[in-house]
Amino acid sequence: MVFIVLGLVSLIFLSIFYKWTTLTYNTFKERGVPFEEPWPLVGNMGAVVLNKESLNKTLLGFYKRNRKHGIVGFYNFRSPVYVVTNPEYIKKILVQDFDFFVNHTPFFKADDHPIVNGMLTVMKDERWRNMRNTLSPVFTASKMRAMFRLISDCLNECLDCLRDLTKGGKHHDIELKDLFTRLSNDIIASTAFGLKVNSYVNPNNEFYLIGKSVSKFRGMQMFKFIVSNSMPKVQKILGYKVFDTAKMAYFKRLVIDTMKYRQEHKVQRPDMIQLLIEAKEESDQNWSDDDIVGQCFIFFFAAFENNANFIATMCHELMENPDVQQRLYEEVLEVHDELGGKPLSYEAVMKMKYMDLVTSETLRKWNLAGFTDRLCSKDYDLTDDDGNIIFKFKANDYVWFPIVGLHYDDKYFEDPESFKPERFSDENKDNIKPFTYLPFGVGPRMCIGNRYALMQAKAMMYYMILDFKLERSPKTVENIMDDVRGFQIDPICGFWVRLVPRGKL
Ligand code: HEM
């Protein structure tokens, strides 16, 4: 009897749970939008959750099967998302009618750490506008120029490490993701937090270890994030935070102590913390400490993984495309000769034309951000040029823009699997259809750190190519994109390359 009751209770519980996992799955049918059949709980994310493929690969497959629809439904776990594939619609939503789509979809559905809520990416409406205006001057060309010296110091420390490993002209096989994550770490510590660390000499420094554990979304942190996203009430009941409170406190202490020290001792340093102190003083807004720490934290969060991926993927493509590498080497050598022994400058970096083509093509092929998103803030009718209604968005609809799909669409980029920097040359770049190339997003909410990311990646590549030829190592994986899993660009076997010192060629 007890077993029958227990069995019945479990059955009822399971059927309620199943109902809940599929509760939202009528949305697209009701709204008349094409969609693919979702799985309970994980929606259309099954392959990513099962670690069978990367998020980018899932999105790309979805885009290819559905690009004929200008708008198509995707279940991100249980959340219905409207994926906009038509570049004309993308322009309307992200630029022309931006006022209906000012905010991102909530990163965390339950309240998380106040520092996380203070990040520019999470801020909403007027608060976002004010902070964006406050921060914009931090990323101008003149501020980047001033910061370049700090970045150069970090690049040279990385180069010292590589020269050490190849002493005597011997080649060396190295995993680039680890190498450049350390570089990215040291640069962001110096330029955003005013902290000088050398993660080659001190591989286990506190900033690096804490930063790595916070920014790598895997294991327990990933689990907490998925629960927070799909079951915010459970997060509320359990009362946990996705980001470890002690680690967030470490970042906060670092920023507040540095700001205090700078103000008390009138210390000036051309870094972001300095610029934030100035921006805070000049702004008519009363920014709290958490708001300021939030910006350092998002700079850290955006830069740590992205910048490492950017340089690692670029090296990987140069290794796979020796003719492109040779052409880049010739340009780098020319600049080196022109500098005549003077250190690399911001102007010299930004003037390299072929380097610019190579970075553009790397960002097209590798999609460090596979999509971006917006939250519809008030009911909005998407219309064509004749005023006919294409789709009626409702307030609180989630909208995604499939950057990876557009970048791999052969309608816009011929032979998209191939690495062809020439696509972006002066002669060819006008053939690129507007709103199909979006590595940094577009419109008033586009990436604020693009100049900073490009500057440091180009400068590092200059030094790398000047000193080393990049060749395949026995550990290099054949098709590295298929080796990537999860939400970030982390190939299981890593980005292996053989560094051959040029002095010995
Ligand atoms: C190659 C490296 C990077 C890529 C591919 C990238 C890409 C992006 C993308 C796609 C967005 C969303 C834009 C949109 O929705 O229209 C974004 C936003 C943002 N990025 Fe980046 N990013 C990179 C590096 C950086 C760096 C180094 C920083 C900071 C130092 C940064 C700071 C931000 C911030 C603060 C936002 C939010 C802007 C806002 O909401 O107003 N990013 N980024």
Image (cartoon, rainbow, N blue to C red):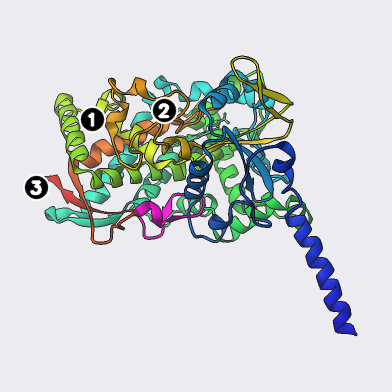
- Residue 476 is left or right of residue 65, and the answer is left
| Sequence-first tag of 1 and 3 | 1
Instruction: For label 3, count other residues whose C-alpha is less than 10 Å away and answer few (under 14), some (14-19) or many (20+).
Output: few
Q: Which residue sits at x=19%, y=43%?
A: 322
Instruction: For label 2, count other residues whose C-alpha is less than 10 Å away and answer few (under 14), some (14-19) or many (20+).
Output: some
Q: Secondary structure at mark 1?
A: loop
Q: In the displayed structure, would residue 345 be above or below residue 9? A: above
Front tag of 1 and 3: 3
Work out whether residue 271 can be spotted.
no
In the rendered structure, which amino acid carries the disc numbered 1?
A: Pro
Tag 1 near tag 2, CB within 8 Å: no
For label 1, the residue is 343
Q: Position of residue 291 (x, y in %)?
A: 64, 33
Q: Nearer the viewer, residue 249 or 470?
A: 470
- Based on the picture, tell me whether residue 141 belongs to the magenta stretch: no
Q: Which residues are magenta?
A: 480-494
Instruction: For label 1, count other residues whose C-alpha is less than 10 Å away and answer few (under 14), some (14-19) or many (20+).
Output: few
Q: Position of residue 315 (x, y in %)?
A: 29, 44
Asked if the residue at label 3 sits under 8 Å from ligand 1, the reply is no
For label 2, the residue is 451
| Direction right: furthest residue | 1
Q: Secondary structure at mark 3?
A: loop
Find the distance from the CA under tag 1 to the CA under tag 2.
Answer: 20 Å
| Sequence-first tag of 3 and 2 | 2
- Based on the picture, tell me whether residue 483 belongs to the magenta stretch: yes
- Residue 109 is left or right of residue 163, and the answer is right
For label 3, the residue is 505
| Position of the N terminus by quadrant | bottom right
Asked if the residue at label 1 sits under 8 Å from ligand 1, the reply is no
Q: Which residue sits at x=83%, y=77%?
A: 7
Q: Nearer the viewer, residue 465 or 195?
A: 465
